[in-house]
């Protein structure tokens, strides 16, 4: 079973147990999903990818506008709106 | 996102469980060999929510048969995946919605009695998974 299928099954179980009102069992299922090492690794990988993309964009934008100033944020937002 | 949401749900459930315990409102889940159920009480109405093991198959006709044996008049609607049964007698009215693995049983009694509701609920589920 792939990590995605495991998560999907887990989420269905969470939904069913919430409907039943079995809070203890629901928490156990959530703990099982969260303790899935492969899933957490995938999550960390995608998080790192987003972080890298963010840093890259930040570096590029720095050359165009004043570093970290309000003006930069304002201009950047205005540029986005114009696009 | 999913991990954050699950962590947030887990935290909220801890809070809800604590509050329910403080107010003594926590619902008892009754465990049986092939199913688990909870009884929600709104006398004279009661709702039994049952979660049946996924490997167990349901026999709807057995439920109707059992209820008729107990003196209920029954009507069955739906096919294959979703079945709705209405049963009534002079003392009670029952609605059963079956969408496996979930079964919801609504029981209204002329004289409210939780033990009777529990007994009826277990009879229905035992007939379903027999």
Image (cartoon, rainbow, N blue to C red):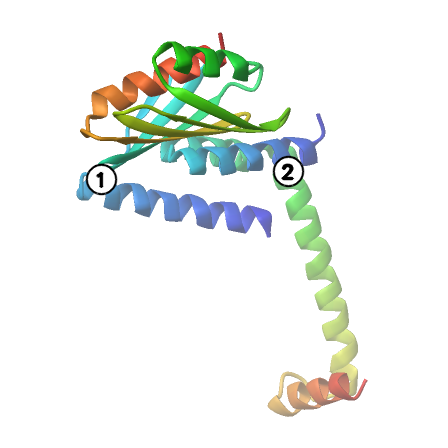
Badge 2 vs badge 1, beta-carbon distance below 8 Å: no
State the count of labels. Answer: 2
The part of the image, by quadrant, that contains residue B100 is top right
Q: Residues within 10 Å of mark 1 (few under 14, many from 20)?
A: few
Q: Chain of mark 2?
A: A
- Where B62 sits versus B76, above or below? above
Q: Nearer the viewer, residue B61 or B32?
A: B61
Q: Is residue B33 visible?
A: no
Which residue sits at x=72%, y=89%?
A: A78
Above or below residue A18? Residue A45 is below
* Above or below: residue B42 compared with residue B96: below
Drawn side of residue B118 relative to residue B130, left or right: left
Q: Which residue is mark 1?
A: B25
Residue drawn at the location 79% of the way across and 76% of the way down: A60
SS of the residue under disc 1: loop
Which of the 4 quarters of the picture holds residue A66?
Answer: bottom right
Crowding around mark 2 (Cα neighbors within 10 Å: few <14, some 14 to 19, many 20+) is some
Residue wearing tag 2: A39
Q: CA distance from mark 2 to mark 1?
A: 35 Å
Give the residue furthest to the right: A83
Query: What's the residue at 76%, 72% (across, down)?
Result: A57
**Mark linked to residue A9:** none
Secondary element under disc 2, as helix, strand or loop, is helix
Q: Measured along the vertical axis of the image, is residue B112 above or below residue A52?
A: above
- Image coordinates of residue A69 in percent, x first then y, are 62, 88
State the image coordinates of residue A38 (x, y, percent, origin top left): 65, 34
Most extreme residue toward the top is B130
């Amino acid at each position: 079973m792939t990590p995605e299928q495991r998560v999907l099954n887990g989420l269905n179980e969470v939904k069913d147990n919430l409907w039943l009102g079995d809070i203890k069992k629901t928490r156990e299922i959530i703990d099982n999903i969260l303790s899935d090492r492969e899933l957490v690794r995938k999550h960390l990988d995608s998080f790192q990818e987003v972080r890298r993309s963010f840093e890259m964009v930040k570096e590029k934008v720095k050359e165009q506008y004043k570093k970290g100033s309000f003006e930069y944020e304002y201009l950047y937002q205005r540029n986005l709106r114009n696009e | 996102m999913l991990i954050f949401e699950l962590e947030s749900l887990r935290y909220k459930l801890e809070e809800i469980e604590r509050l329910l315990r403080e107010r003594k409102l926590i619902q008892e889940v009754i465990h049986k060999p092939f199913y688990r159920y909870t009884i929600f009480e709104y006398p004279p109405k009661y709702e039994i929510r049952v979660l049946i093991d996924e490997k167990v198959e349901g026999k709807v006709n057995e439920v109707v048969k059992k209820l008729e044996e107990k003196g209920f008049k029954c009507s069955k609607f739906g096919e294959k995946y979703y079945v709705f049964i209405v049963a009534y007698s002079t003392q009670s009215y029952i609605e059963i919605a079956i969408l496996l693995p979930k079964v919801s049983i609504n029981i209204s009694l002329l004289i409210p009695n939780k033990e009777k509701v529990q007994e009826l609920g277990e009879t229905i589920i035992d007939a379903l998974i027999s």
